[in-house]
Image (cartoon, helix red, strand yellow):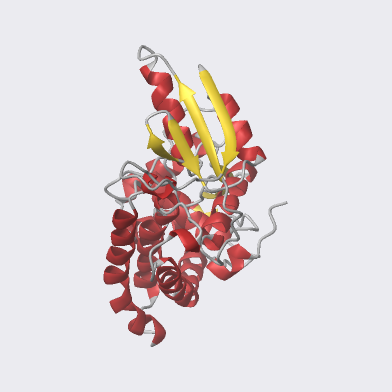
Amino acid sequence: MVSPFEIEEIFPEEAPASRLPRRRQEGASAQALAATLIADYTLPERIWLPSAAIVALLVESGASSGAARTAISRLTRRGVLESSRDGRHSSHRLTADAAGELLTGGAWIARFGHQDRVWDGCWTLVAFSLPEAQGARRRSLRAELRWLGFAPLYDGLWVSPDDLNPTVERRLAAVAFGALTVFRARHADLAVRANRSPVDAWDLSAIAEHYEEFDRRWRPLLPRVRRGEITGAAAIEARTQIMDAYRRIPLLDPQLPTELLPAGWPRSRVRDLFVAVYDGLAGQAEKHVQTVVSQAAATPVSVAVRAQTMVGLASISLG
C-alpha cells in the first residue's frame, strides 16, 4: 500500500503519470516536504494554493526560497502538481492521481493499529528459488515481499500472518521470476532445539525499541499540545516531524496478531500518542496556513484550507 507520507520509491524526473518524490533517510527533501504540506491542508478537495503561499510555508519549514520554487517546478513535471495562472499570480494543487495515492496512504496510516486483528492461526508462505546469477531479480522479489509484510524465515521461504489477498497476488505475479510457490499452513511446534517459529522471522526487540524511541521523543511534547502552547509555524513543523517519524512504523511493524506478541506490546500506546499530538495540533496549524494563504492570494480563497487528522483519514471511504 502506498502511503501519502511515506514517499520512498525512486522515480525518474520525467514521467507520464503521478510520481511522488523520494524521501531521503536523513529527512524530508524539499519536494517531499512540499507534497506533504500540500496534501496535509488541501485534501480531499484538492484546493488550489497560491504558489507564493507554498513557497512561504516551505521557507518556514527550513527550505530556501530557491529550493522551494524548484521543488514546485519538479513536482509539476512529475505529475504530482498541476498549475494555474491568473495574470502574474500562479497557483498549484495536487493532480487527481497524486491525490488518490496520498489519500489511500493516509487512510492506511490512520487505520494502522486502530484495532486488534482476528487471526485464524494460519500463515501465508512464499517459497522461491532463483539462480545466483539473477541477483537483481532476487533483490527485487525480496523488496516486494518486505513491502507486502512478509519476512524471511529462511533464505528462500518468507512468511506472513495475513491472508492471501488480491493485492498480494497481483504484486507477486509482477515479480514472480523463476520458481515460486505460495501456500497457507499452520505451524507445528516440534519439541526440538532446532525448532524455529515463524515469529522468529521478525526482530521484535528491534521493532519494540523503535516504538520506545518514538515515545521518548514525543511524549514530553504532549502536555504543551494539550495546553495549546504550540502555535503558528511551530505547530506545522511539529505535525510534519511527528508524521515523518511515525509513518515509518507501519513499515517496520507487521501487525502480528496479539497472541504472537510479547506482553505490553507498545503499538497501541504509541499510536495514541501520535494521534494526540498530530490531531491536537491540527487547529493551530490550520489557522496558520489559512493566514499564509490569505496573505499570498490575489483574490479571496473560495474554499478554506483544512488540516488533515487521523480521525478524518480513517473515516475516508476508498472503495
Q: Is residue 118 above or below residue 264?
A: above
Viewer can see residue 62: no
Q: Position of residue 290 (x, y in %)?
A: 51, 69
How many circles with numbers are drawn on the protein?
Answer: 0
Question: Is residue 19 shown left or right of residue 95?
Answer: left
Identify the residue at the far front of this view: 191
Looking at the picture, tell me which residue is in the foreground, 84 or 39.
39
Q: Is residue 167 above or below residue 138?
A: below
Looking at the picture, tell me which residue is in the foreground, 139 or 84.
139
Identified at 62% across, 41% down, the residue is 164
Viewer can see residue 9: yes
Considering the image in quadrants, where does the N terminus appear? top right
Q: Is residue 223 above or below residue 148?
A: below
Identify the residue at the far bottom of this view: 227
Identified at 45% across, 20% down, the residue is 129
Q: Position of residue 243 (x, y in %)?
A: 41, 61
Q: Position of residue 19 (x, y in %)?
A: 51, 36
Answer with the quarter of the image where residue 182 lies. Answer: top right
Identify the residue at the far top of this view: 133
Q: Position of residue 175 (x, y in %)?
A: 53, 24
Answer with the quarter of the image where residue 17 lies. Answer: top right
